[in-house]
Amino acid sequence: MDSLITASARALAAGDALGALKRVALRKDPPALALRGIAMAQLGDHPRARELLKRAARAFGAHEELAQARCVVAEAEVAMAMRDFAGSPRALAAAAATLEAHADTANALQAWLITARRLLLLGRLDEAAAVLAKLDARGLPPSLRAVAELTSAELALRSLRVGEARMALARAHAAAERAQVPALMAEVTEARAALDRPAARRLTAGGEQALRLDEVSALLASDALVVDACRRGLGAGEQWRPLARRPVLFSLARSLAEAWPGDISREALIESAFRTTRPDETHRARLRVEI
């Protein structure tokens, strides 16, 4: 590997995308294309980054499977940033296996972290947790350790395990400080700050109250009957009834909860559930069925 490629790779590892580009901007050999693609991704130009990484993977060819696998991993991360989930996860899994076979532990972990984050974005929490459980982030570069802890924190937050999320973010913050990558430090700082911002509104007969995530978690764990307008369901302690597939029933439950402890007229229920201000006997019959 020549000195410019080495210097460019080091600049990227430190988060200096512009410095990396200055060294390889005019080169079209496969390693330079790959580095240019990663740099463009760091700068936020994801379509251009994806194009460069595809060109690099083709240029490396099957005889350089390690370099090609690294390009596949980088392209998968760009696709995730673009929220493009059309690609098959098999290519990423195959790339991870190739990296592990060549003892490239850091890039293999990166591949599995991308897999876990992709599953999180798709709402497949159990599968994401299974992937994370197999990973051992100890002894890795601080930047990857920070990403691993950020992913663990996001998984915990999706399940409203706020205490676990705070601990994971504290570990991510320590790792990001060691890595000294500005973008990574900013991401961790933002994630920690988000925990202390209002995340939901609690509407009761006494009025409206803004809640932080830990307060939301405590409310949902209590015995109070909660009409959850975010997940669209009813909860009380450990009991949960999803109503996302029953929009009319959920609308009625919400209207009744908003009126509680007072009454609400049949006409108001029909208007909220069936979106009409001129009810007839069919609407009244449907209301009786839903109730």
Image (cartoon, helix red, strand yellow):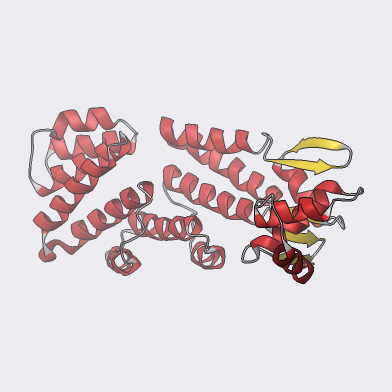
Which residue occupies 12% across, 66% down? 62
Q: In which quarter of the image is the N terminus?
A: top left
Residue 158 seen from this side: yes
Residue 219 or 115: which is nearer the viewer? 219
- The front one of 47 and 8 is 47
Q: In which quarter of the image is the C terminus?
A: bottom right
Instruction: Name which residue lies at 31% across and 55% down.
Output: 76
Residue 192: percent from left, percent from top: 60, 37
Please say if 20 is above or below 149.
Answer: above
Rendered location of residue 15, percent (x, y): 34, 33
The residue at 57%/55% (across/down) is 155
- Drawn side of residue 138 relative to residue 92, left or right: right
Check the image and report above or below for 126 versus 12: below
290 sits to left or right of 119:
right
Q: Which residue is drawn at 84% across and 52% down?
A: 265
Name the quadrant containing residue 142. Answer: top left
**Location of residue 25 in the rendering, given as x and y in whole percent from the top left corner:** 13, 33
- 145 relative to 289, above or below: above
